[in-house]
């Protein structure tokens, strides 16, 4: 049997008990391994001990996951911003985007990963997606349970002829919405794949240097075993890692 492609999955700097840990929620890894049919390795966010340049050549693709931390505003030319932040993840994740694109290999993102790719490619973020009068609420109210956060839903419209419209075979989805930040200025070279009813960009794609880049603001990993639209995102990742996208 031929070896499966190897997906790198970014880790976060977290604290478990009293100790620092490199952590990624299993739902991201399991969804990718099952529905993309890939092997996976966790990428530590320890820029003092390794560089993206050392890791990228050993991977067939990367997945930048969601997480509670926000991209540091200094990364996109601003100063003020609400944490928590994970500066180590910023350094490794943004570097991995650059290095994987240089290598022409797939770069997929979910939630924070969606925001990281935009920042790595020169875009900016806005930090008011749960409190702006001009936007629908993109996060459940404060105090909602963990499960209720992922039950906070809204529709998105997929752009006709786009990568995701083709992958999902439809023009509209209902997605979960668990983010306080979103796209401010979309990076040059990224093509909008989906929008929320308020016009906020919810997905994009690109192919810089031949590298398939696809990212979504919502969380397909949350229900990939029960929701075929969510599973379709990971099947697209599997095809991209096999050179079929």
Image (cartoon, rainbow, N blue to C red):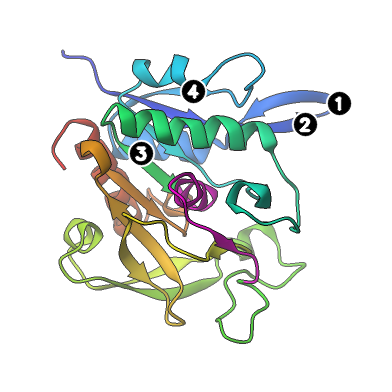
Residue on which disc 1 sits: 18
Q: Does residue 6 belong to the magenta stretch?
A: no
Q: x%, y% of residue 99?
A: 39, 28
Say whether disc 2 or disc 4 marks the residue closer to the N-terminus: 2
Looking at the image, tell me whether mark 2 or mark 3 is earlier in sequence order. Answer: 2
Give the number of the mark in front: 4 or 1. Answer: 4
Residue placed most toward the observer, 54 or 141: 54
**Residue 66 point in image, percent of width and height:** 55, 47
The Cα atoms of the two marked residues, 2 and 1, are separated by: 6 Å
Q: Are marks 3 and 1 in contact (CB under 8 Å)?
A: no
Q: Start and end of the magenta stretch?
A: 110-128
The quarter in which the C terminus is drawn is top left
Which residue sits at x=57%, y=71%? 138
Q: Residue at x 40, y 40 (%)?
A: 31
> Which of the two residues, 207 or 179, is positioned nearer the viewer here?
207
The earlier-in-sequence mark between 3 and 1 is 1
- Binning the other alpha carbons within 10 Å of mark 2 as few (below 14), some (14 to 19) or many (20 upward) gives few
Image quarter hosting the N terminus: top left
- Of the residues under marks 4 and 1, which one precedes in the sequence? 1
- In what element is the residue under mark 2? strand
Is 111 magenta? The answer is yes
> What separation in Å lies between label 4 and label 1 (alpha carbons)?
28 Å
Neighbourhood count class around disc 3 (C-alpha, 10 Å): few under 14, some 14–19, many 20 upward = many
Which residue is identified by label 4? 52
| Numbered label attached to residue 15 | 2
Residue 213 position, x and y percent, is 31, 45
Q: Which residue is mark 3?
A: 107
């Amino acid at each position: 049997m031929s070896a499966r492609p190897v997906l790198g999955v970014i880790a976060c700097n977290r604290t478990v008990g009293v100790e620092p840990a490199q952590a990624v929620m299993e739902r991201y890894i399991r969804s990718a391994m099952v529905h993309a049919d890939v092997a996976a390795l966790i990428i530590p966010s320890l820029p003092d001990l390794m560089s993206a340049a050392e890791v990228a050549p050993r991977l067939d693709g990367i997945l930048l996951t969601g997480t509670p931390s926000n991209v540091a505003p200094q990364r996109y030319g601003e100063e003020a911003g609400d944490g928590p932040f994970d500066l180590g993840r910023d350094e490794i994740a943004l570097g991995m985007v650059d290095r994987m694109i240089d290598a022409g290999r797939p770069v997929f993102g979910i939630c924070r990963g969606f925001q990281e790719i935009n920042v790595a490619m020169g875009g900016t973020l806005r930090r008011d997606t749960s409190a702006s009068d001009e936007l629908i609420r993109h996060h459940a109210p404060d105090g909602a349970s963990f499960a209720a956060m992922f039950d906070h839903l809204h529709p998105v419209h997929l752009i006709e002829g786009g990568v995701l419209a083709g992958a999902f075979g439809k023009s509209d989805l209902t997605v979960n919405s668990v983010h306080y930040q979103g796209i401010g200025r979309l990076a040059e070279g990224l093509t909008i794949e989906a929008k929320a009813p308020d016009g906020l960009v919810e997905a994009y794609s690109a192919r810089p240097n031949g590298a398939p880049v696809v990212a979504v603001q919502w969380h397909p990993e949350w229900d990939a075993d029960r929701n075929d639209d969510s599973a379709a995102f990971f099947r697209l990742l599997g095809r991209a890692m096999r050179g079929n996208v």
